[in-house]
Amino acid sequence: MTTPTGSSAAVDGSSIALYTAEFAADPHDTYREMRRRFGSFVPVELAPGVPATLVIGYHEAVRILNDPEHFPADPRVWQEKIPDSCPVKPLMRWYPGPLRSAGVAHARYRQVNVAAIDGVNLYSRHAAVERMAIPLINTFCGAGEADLLSQYAFPLVFAGLNDMLGCPPELGIRVATGMAHLFNSVDDNAGLGMAMLSEALLELIACKRTEPGDDMLTRMVQHPADLDEEEILANIITLYGAALEPQQNLIVNTLLLILTDDRFAADVLGGSLSTRDALDEVLFTDPPVANLATTYPRQPILIGDTWLPAHQPVLISLSACNNDPAISGDFLGNRSHLAWSTGPHACPATRLASLIAEDAIDQLLDALPEMRLAVPAEELTWRPGPFHRALAALPVVFPKSPPLDVL
């Protein structure tokens, strides 16, 4: 079988590598070729020698995500066969948190996360985003150019998440560095990233036990479920993993759409289309977490005419499923996408994440309405990695402007 033109290289004539720069550069062309060659279930490699099945059919994905009995999220049998040097193992391995559990354990962990998130005052987040966005914009508005990823989206999301968790900046920097290594998953630094992340967060947990506050981590520490240190650590990692990298990528991917698509470039500022419309379209077409929601069948299972092996990762391609021709239609106002997943492991913070992304984009567009890309869109670089859809940078130019008034 030949390697499909324009897609990532097939590693052995049948499996497709998701970790290459070629796949990152144009995953949508690869998804189309996958669908032509394989249908809804695609043999892939997450790293060299690490096979998995990628689900690219929307209806098949919904079935799997709503069937934790046959498709549990526990990777412990799988990870025994994976060497510690494997770059994807630190992100995928078992830990006592909601993303890697099922049944009673999952319910116990998830209630802690939900309680921590539900305690966030959404109204106060509007003011918090503005309070954090304006000083950031002021650092580059007079220069006439900026990288919206490193100078705006990342520091804004980072500061906001640390604020909600009650994490001081010096610990937060170590957390962010560790999380970035985990999500890259294409080098030997993922294990180091997990070690950095765990060390910083254990210090933060100890701090909250002695100095509680009105924040998500304090609500976790004080929750009646009485999680131990390892369990609290796993739950915080879940929150950082779900919020830091995906949130910054959602903001940046949406800004890219607004800056390059004529429907949005004029109409968002003119009032015809909203930032919310742009976000909805990105969540359909280019969600920041492209391939994840991983499960591990306990025994071989037949779906349609495809056998899925036992104890081998089954990943949902949230991106490819959203663009399945079986559900194609108008994106505007349509929120039936799988970007937040579905079923018992669906994201519990969709309102909060959407609010932060929308406010962050609106603050920037209001301040710099004449902003445009500094390079042609085709020259932008997408970071390789099997899980995310992430630009390396989003350089823009705009007329120089004076600093905004700080609240």
Image (cartoon, rainbow, N blue to C red):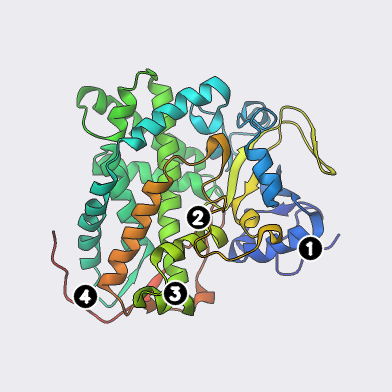
Element under disc 1: loop
Q: Earlier in the sequence, mark 2 or mark 1?
A: 1
Element under disc 4: loop
Disc 2: CA contacts within 10 A as few (<14), some (14-19) or many (>=20) = many
Q: CA distance from mark 4 to mark 2?
A: 30 Å
Residue at left 25%, top 70%? Answer: 140
Disc 3: CA contacts within 10 A as few (<14), some (14-19) or many (>=20) = many
Residue at left 55%, top 27%? Answer: 101
Q: Position of residue 156 (x, y in %)?
A: 30, 55
Image height check: is 77 above or below 275?
A: above
Q: According to the image, label 3 marks what residue?
A: 264
- Give the numbered dot on residue 288: 2
Q: Position of residue 180 (x, y in %)?
A: 44, 48
Q: Are marks 4 and 1 in contact (CB under 8 Å)?
A: no
Of discs 4 and 3, which sits in the foreground? Answer: 3
Q: Earlier in the sequence, mark 4 or mark 1?
A: 1
- Give the numbered dot on residue 142: 4
Is residue 57 in sight in this rendering?
yes
Q: In the rendered view, does 280 fall on the left or right side of 163? A: right
Element under disc 2: loop
Q: Quadrant of residue 395?
A: bottom left
Q: According to the image, label 1 marks what residue?
A: 3
Q: Quadrant of the C terminus?
A: bottom left
Residue type marked 4? Gly
Q: Are marks 2 and 1 in contact (CB under 8 Å)?
A: no
Image height check: is 179 above or below 220?
A: below
- Give the numbered dot on residue 337: none
